[in-house]
Amino acid sequence: MTSPAPAWEHATHVLVRELHGEDYELPPRVQVGHTVIGMLATSTWAIEGVYLATAGLNGVDLTLTEPLVPHCGVSVPALELRMREPVPRVANTPHPQWANRMLAAIAAEVISPTPWYRLDHSCAGHHLGEYDLLTARTWGCNTCGRDPATEYAPRFEAHATGMRLDPSIDLDITIAVCPSCHEILHQPIAPSVNELMYGLRPECPQCGDRQADVVTLNTALPAPVGVIALAELNPAEAPDFVCRHCHHQW
């Protein structure tokens, strides 16, 4: 009869790092054969991957394993909703039974993510004001530029950017975005408004940077971020984009 393996042989560890920080620091307690849950300190906290500790050339390496977490991550608040208890946001080695529950919750979120609006979020209570609606009807979605004049125009929603014109006034700047972009902006590992907006536009053919401002001849309303209004240009000579980095026009 085989004796049971020591508890540490199948231990699961939770490691934490910053979103744009370096790789995880592996403490000595992480041994080959252990499971590691990688947690990112984003604005809402997210699981970015589940790993198996394997033998590497210079010690222990981390290899992705099941459940395979998508690039947008898994929301820690969504895990708490499923597990009905808080998830510590610090590096720890949980009890095996609790770790298995957390891994099961991660697997469930990978298959069927909890909608962001069911969780506590920064856009709660925000709505589009008259100016935001007028801007959206003229320029479209503030991130992807979806044209509001098309037959099947999207329904615009208010996204709180976290920025303020006046720090002394407790009022976040909101922008009008389409539902698809709004969902991306609320992913567990989400881009900023600028990262999403410029990421959807072409890179500059001269410098290769991806910061293309859209050129328009429409000066009826102040142009939103990412749009340059140049009324003095001849429509036949107006470029489509201007690079914010090198100012190349194309």
Image (cartoon, rainbow, N blue to C red):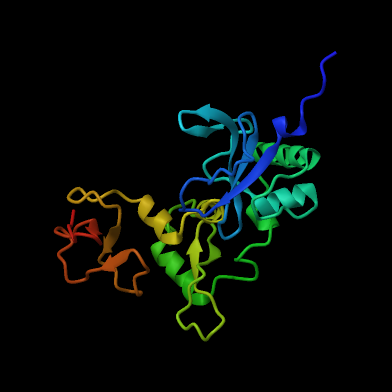
Q: Quadrant of residue 70?
A: top right
Q: Quadrant of residue 197?
A: bottom left
Residue at image location 55% in from the left, 54% down from the top: 179
Indicate the position of residue 64 as horizontal and vertical percent values: 55, 32
168 in relation to 210, above or below: below
- Tag count in the figure? 0
Residue at image location 66% in from the left, 57% down from the top: 117
Closer-to-camera residue (130/163): 163
Q: Name the outermost residue toward the top.
A: 1
Tell me if I can see residue 145 in this picture.
Answer: no
Residue at image location 46% in from the left, 49% down from the top: 22
Tell me if I can see residue 22 in this picture.
Answer: yes
Indicate the position of residue 91 as horizontal and vertical percent values: 64, 51
Q: Quadrant of residue 217?
A: bottom left
* In this rendering, position of residue 32 left or right of residue 22: right
205 in relation to 11, above or below: below
Residue at image location 60% in from the left, 71% down from the top: 126
Indicate the position of residue 135 as horizontal and vertical percent values: 43, 69
Indicate the position of residue 1 as horizontal and vertical percent values: 85, 13
